Image (cartoon, helix red, strand yellow):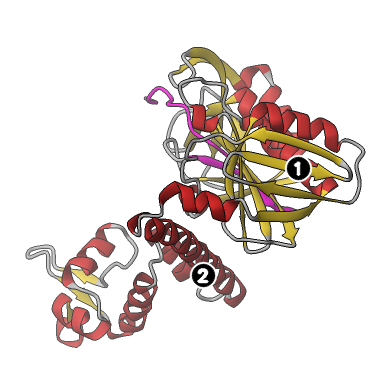
Amino acid sequence: MKSNMLGIGSMARASGLSVSALRFYDSAEVFVPALVDRQTGYRWYGHDQVDEARLIARLRRVGMALPAIGRVLDHRSDPAAVVALLNAHLRRLEEGLSDARRELSAVEQLILGKGRSDMAATESQFRLSVDGPRLLEALTAVRFAVSTDPEFPMLGGVLLDAADNELRLVATDRCRLAIASTPATDFTARGLNVVAPTAFIDDLLAALEGQAGELTISADEDQIIVTIGTHAIASQRLDHDFPDYRRLLRAQRGHRIEMDAAALREMVRGAAAVRGMTDERHGAESGVTVLVLDETGVLSVDPEVVGGHLRIGVNREFLLQAVDAAAGNQLVLELDGPISPLAIRNPASPSRLSILMPVELPATK
């Protein structure tokens, strides 16, 4: 039988994967040999596995993570699912390239000795236009996640990050991250990246109530200005670098659960769903909701469950705020496990996203 099979070296040459990679994919149960000799431990592969190995090699060359590769292999008989997975990875690559261009542009200016002053000169020419009601929706979707911790002044506001005809708003307090975006037009420069302080955001939210039509956002070295008709709101910009949030956007999570928002709220608010725990990042006791995903893909809330189920603990109040901020009847929850962030999306508004950091749960017996 082995005479008609490929050893690990032959499979490596036929597929373009290294021997060490084949061993790793075996241990990760992504690509398992057809036969393993119990006495020697030698791996043997069937000739019909060569195409699969070559597929894995191609996906790895474009940087696809192993969990995503596993999903592609699992859905090979479903062309629509495969196309969706490949397109999702392509979008992540394009976002990464856009981020790289932005960072390299900043590095170029620093190396050439231009530094902050010249970058500010570019920003002083920046202006864009957005729809007032859409901006109000986006600000409302992220305001809840702004930090109030004086030890992290760079988080004490909302990041306004503009590129590719879009204004993205981002807020985080290290325990959660909220993102929303709105289309933008009339760019006069590229690369706006300004942190607007909380007081300014609150003034802007109040001013936008009941307003219709477009408004203008501009920024210079010191200020950010929003002009609504003949009325202008101005504030000093925060002179801090906002942390890189984009890596969380590109994170791949293994489970996507569709849920009715009202049903999720009801589960979370149930008394049995919460227990007092200390969240070290806040230094205070907070209610923690334990989300449980069983082997059939059903999500429930149960702090007492044990066994092989996937469990993740999140701050109860933060979870409810994220559900409200999503502003949808149907939500998608993305999760991987007890140490990975939980993502909450509104499929009807893909520009909105909340990410909650997990709270460490006691080990189950």
**Mark 2 or mark 1, earlier in chain:** 2
Q: How many marks?
A: 2
- According to the picture, the residue beneath numbered tag 2 turns out to be 90
**Left or right of 313 in this view: 23:** left
Is residue 106 placed above or below 230 in the rendered structure?
A: below
Residue nearer the viewer, 275 or 327: 327
**Left or right of 188 in this view: 119:** left
Residue nearer the viewer, 286 or 93: 93
Q: Can you tell which mark lies on residue 269?
A: none
Q: Which residues are magenta?
A: 341-365
Q: Quadrant of residue 211?
A: top right
Q: Quadrant of residue 136?
A: top right
Q: Position of residue 240 (x, y in %)?
A: 49, 36
SS state under label 1 = strand
Q: Residue at x 67, y 58 (%)?
A: 166
- According to the picture, the residue beneath numbered tag 1 turns out to be 226
